[in-house]
Image: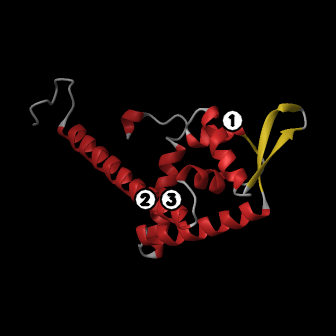
Amino acid sequence: MSPDAGTGTGTGADTDADEVVAELSGLVFEVTGRLRAQFNAAAAELGLPPAQALVLTNLSGPAPMRQLADWLSCEPSNVTGIVDGLERRGLVTRRSTPGDRRVKLVVLTEDGEDKRRQLRSSTNALARTVFELPGPDQKHLRDLLARVLAGPPAGADAESG
């Protein structure tokens, strides 16, 4: 029997689960760091700062500046400089929203679409090196990560885990 059994402070199983969760967290952060470094390198090869590259990869249609700020986890005022840089490069344009001229939409230009394709192609090629697993393992990892992101099923009891 573990020393904390029956004390309400947890059991050996709880401690093991906590260690696994800590290890999972560390591994996910390490993989994320590798992916980020590869993304930044691919962006640099295309002459883009990481923030501009993030906007390009996430912009699939006209988007308000506020949405870009949410994607980048920054203040809307910071997005102005990022979009200015993309606009100077001819990769995006700003358009007024039909219903509210104060809201500016950021839209990819043809050159922006081309640069986005190049960036996505390069980052996908690099990501293949991170996830170099047999096909079934890749799919299993994908499915597990999708389940983690989806959260627990409705009505699931955290204690029944």
Residue behind mark 2? 37
- The image quadrant of residue 137 is bottom left
Locate residue 140 relative to residue 114 in the image: left or right.
left
Residue farthest toward the bottom in the current orientation of the protein: 134
Under tag 2, what secondary structure? Answer: helix
- The image quadrant of residue 97 is top right
Locate residue 105 relative to residue 77 in the image: left or right.
right
- Residue 43 % position (x, y): 54, 61
Q: State the separation of the CA atoms marked 1 and 2.
A: 26 Å
Of callouts 2 and 3, which one flags the residue occurring earlier in the amino acid sequence?
A: 2
Under tag 3, what secondary structure? Answer: helix
Locate residue 152 relative to residue 103 in the image: left or right.
left
Residue behind mark 3? 143
Q: Which residue is pictured at 35% across the width and 54% down the height?
A: 30
Which amino acid is tagged 2?
Ala
Under tag 1, what secondary structure? Answer: helix
The image quadrant where one finds the C terminus is: top left
